[in-house]
Amino acid sequence: MPRTTLVVFQKGIDNLSPENADEATLAIYLAHRPTLVNYAKGIVGIAADAEDIAQEAWLRFNASSVDPQKPECVSYLYRTVKHLAIDRLRSRSRESKLIQFEPSGTTGALAEERVLTENPIVPREELRLFQEAVAELPPVTQQAIRMKRVEGLKLKEISERLNLSITRVHTLIREGVEHCRRKVRL
């Protein structure tokens, strides 16, 4: 146990003076740590991530100018944990969207190998269903989705290349992606 922690427990939270602000923030954090970890775990669902989030919250709390003698410092800790947990979920969501369409001319085996290498979590069955769903789409929809998702073109650029309105391109992409999602979920 670090020396600061021992000092905090020997003095007690109430006996800490403003000069010992670091000890006070540590004492508050340690008193609420188990609850903070459980709170984060309830949001992110993974204990290791929850531990990391609680630790990051402590680092931010300790570096902040929040007065440890005021009751709102505990609220600050919980808000920080909540925001960090939500950020972690968003990050995880972005990472899970690695399924991309392959440019035409790429063999199915190479496409499957690339996607499985990038994201080994994606089961082969889902990949097969996804490829079948894309193949069921009209060619213009496949092109629009490929241009948007693989080439990263803007709707305006796609509409110019396909000689369609921006609204129509948006509709094609939305309907195509929804079709693929429905097929993969079945």
Image (spheres, rainbow, N blue to C red):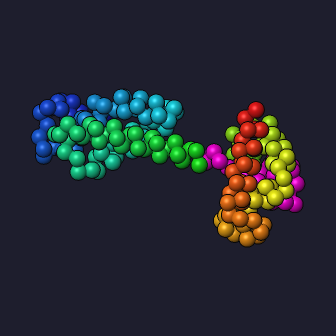
Residue at 20%, 41% (x, y): give it: 68
Q: Quadrant of the C terminus?
A: top right
Residue at screen point 30% across, 31% down: 32
Q: Looking at the image, can residue 17 be seen?
A: yes
The image shows residue 35, relative to residue 83, as above or below, that is above
Boundaries of the magenta span = 95-114
Q: Quadrant of residue 82?
A: top left
Q: How many marks?
A: 0
Residue 96 coordinates in the image, percent (x, y) = 63, 45
Q: Is residue 72 left or right of residue 82?
A: left
Q: Is residue 135 left or right of residue 36?
A: right
Point 73% across, 71% down: residue: 160
- x and y, in percent, of residue 136 in the image: 85, 46
Give 58 or 97, whichever is nearer the viewer: 97
Is residue 109 magenta-colored?
yes
Residue 141 lies, in percent from the top left, at: 79, 55
Q: Does 53 sit left or right of 67 as displayed?
A: right
Tell me, yes or no, if residue 118 can be seen here.
no
Q: Quadrant of residue 52?
A: top left
Question: Per the image, is 112 magenta?
Answer: yes
Q: Quadrant of the N terminus?
A: top left
On the image, the x and y values in percent for residue 105 come to 87, 60
Q: As rendered, which of 72 and 48 lies closer to the eye?
A: 72
The front one of 80 and 24 is 80
User: In terms of image quadrants, where is residue 93?
Assistant: top right
